[in-house]
Image: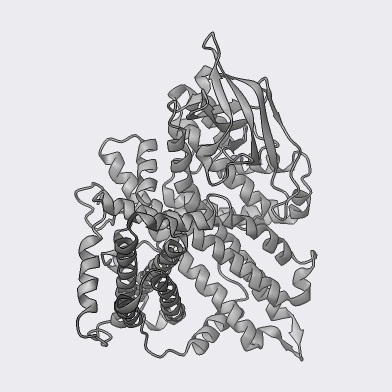
Amino acid sequence: MNTATENKNLLKGGEWLIKESAPFDAFIAEDFNEEQQMVKDMCASFLDADVLPIIDRIDKLEPGLMPSLLAKAGEQGLLGTSIPEEYGGLGKDFITSTLVNEGLGGGFSFSVAIAAHTGIGSLPILYFGTAEQKQKYIPKLASGEWKGAYGLTEPNSGSDALGAKTTAKLSNDGKYYVLNGQKCWITNGGFADVYTVFAKIDGDKFSAFIVERGFEGFTQGQEEHKMGIKGSSTVQLYFQDCKVPAGNLLGQIGKGHIIAFNILNIGRLKLCAAALGGAKRAASTSIQYAVTREQFKTPISNFGAIKNKIAEMAIKIWVGESALYRTAKWIDDMETELKNTGKPFNEALLGAAEEYAIECAMLKVFGSEVLDFVVDEGVQIHGGNGFSDEYIISKAYRDSRINRIYEGTNEINRLLTVDMVLKRAMKGKLDLMGPAMAVQKELMSIPDFGSGDGAPFAKERKLISNFKKAILMVAGAAVQKLMMKIESEQEILMHIADMAIETFNSECALLRSMKLVSQRGEAACAHELDIVRAYLYDAADYINKFGKDAINAFAEGDEQRMMLLGLKRFTKTDPFNNKDAKRRIANKLITENKYPL
């Protein structure tokens, strides 16, 4: 089903909150076609053969090494996966390009460099450039002949990107824009050939420019000494009467925010993919260590405390993967629909990514926090050895930390999640009022403590339906009570965002397991069912805590008591032996001696 009128099962951004989905409407990792699996395998082979054996050299910023690796990746087509063939790329779909980010996500600093090059280093020109600009720059970026970077952040403007101070002024003869200012934390900045740089024309029109290395008045600072991703080139950029040809204005004057924010939607999803790729490799490293490390005359993998850590890693990774590829397929399908309405490829993908900006923000938060969890527990499994640079898990621990900061801090992305949902509702794109009112009426009715009608997965589906009711109840009451003041109640907004993240993940994981059971049978999916049921059991407690903290922050008296009772009802679960389920999960991975890539 390719057209907008035919694909009636494609949910719009945020609609999962008020609508149910059938398992076969969800794309899952097991649906990758043969070509996509080959691409994924090629990425793993590239890391194993070309990157990981020289990771220490990369971390020492050996001159020319990272650019040569990017060029080598370009020779294999890994830099141009999603770039149209007319510009020297492979023209693959969005899922395939997401797979590349995941497959290369375990490459430490190299992963950062290639993600920056293929994302923010290339996409602004591809999606917003003129025909001449695309013909000049994109083929060289796709091949790796030229390397790309992106200059947005400044010393005094991080999350507040529009507060940038860098200025641009058109020369008297109209031939050049003269840029003055500086940019910081520029990934690939030390060796890039092409930069997308943001500046305010005449001090107030936020705009973007294509700046080449070698332009008069453009210089760079020394490499930053960072906590992690030490092999990633990170420098400041300086513009002192820098002359940029007028033809290198990117997009429209005063519309730079459209470029910056639309590119971020894609970047957030791709960051989740890379983080999960890194998490899979870090989990494997920890499993293999636990199997070989002996204490008290037995491998530490035999200890329940270690099994619990391994299982928690596996659960979070598998659930994150479920949410990632469900969303990636939504974007891919929406892109196809927009193309079928006559939209050019750039507008189609950007429009699709914007439609699912809510989900991209949630994925960025969850993926980065999964990786942080996995590497932190990985260090713990390694014990004292985990604190030694001789063990690669220490590098993974340091390199992970940045992911919760760039592409919008996790705090900003949590706030954006709720803000975007409310704005979509206000614009009539998302009908929240009807479902929210229905939940309020339900709170006044006799409690239903049933678990479903006995149909397959009825209990789990009802639980997720109740999670959604909890969100609608809390968010609806908060908006009613606080009105416009809700924007300043960031703690409440972040609690609601966390409820949404847990609920979305739960639904994606359940749909994936239901689809697998329908294809393979329940007995063959025992591992996946353990993962889903363990996650749902824990999610119920998390959602209860987030909801309770939010309610107590704005409600009092009878209203507070009614909502707390409702929240308790909506997060009620049947007894479940979480310990045994997690032991079974861990035992399977210990037997395989890895987390499968």
Q: Nearer the viewer, residue 580 or 361?
A: 361
Where is the C terminus found, in terms of image quarters? bottom right
Asked if one can make out residue 82 in the rendered structure from this viewpoint, the answer is no
Q: Is residue 124 visible?
A: yes
Residue lying furthest top in this view? 173
Task: Specify the farthest residue to the front.
Answer: 557
Q: Give the image location of residue 190, x and y in percent.
A: 70, 37
Corner quadrant of residue 305: bottom right
Spot occupied by residue 438 in the image (x, y as percentages of width and height) = 20, 70
**Percent position (x, y) of residue 453?**
22, 85
Occupied quadrant, residue 34: bottom left
Residue found 74% across the figure and 49% down from its top = 58
Scheme of colours in the image = one colour
Residue lying at 21% horizontally and 77% vertically, measured from the top left = 442
On screen, residue 561 versus residue 48, left or right, reads left
Question: Is 268 in front, or is 105?
Answer: 268
Along the line of sight, the residue nearer the viewer: 388 or 44: 388
Please say if 391 is above or below 99.
below
How many numbered tags mark residues here?
0
- Which residue appears at 70% of the width and 71% of the height? 379
Residue 574 lies, with reference to residue 84, above or below; the image says below
* Place of residue 552 in the rendered image (x, y in percent of width and height, measured from the top left): 41, 74
Residue at coordinates 70% horizontally, 60% vertically from top-left? 398
Q: Nearer the viewer, residue 467 or 315?
A: 467
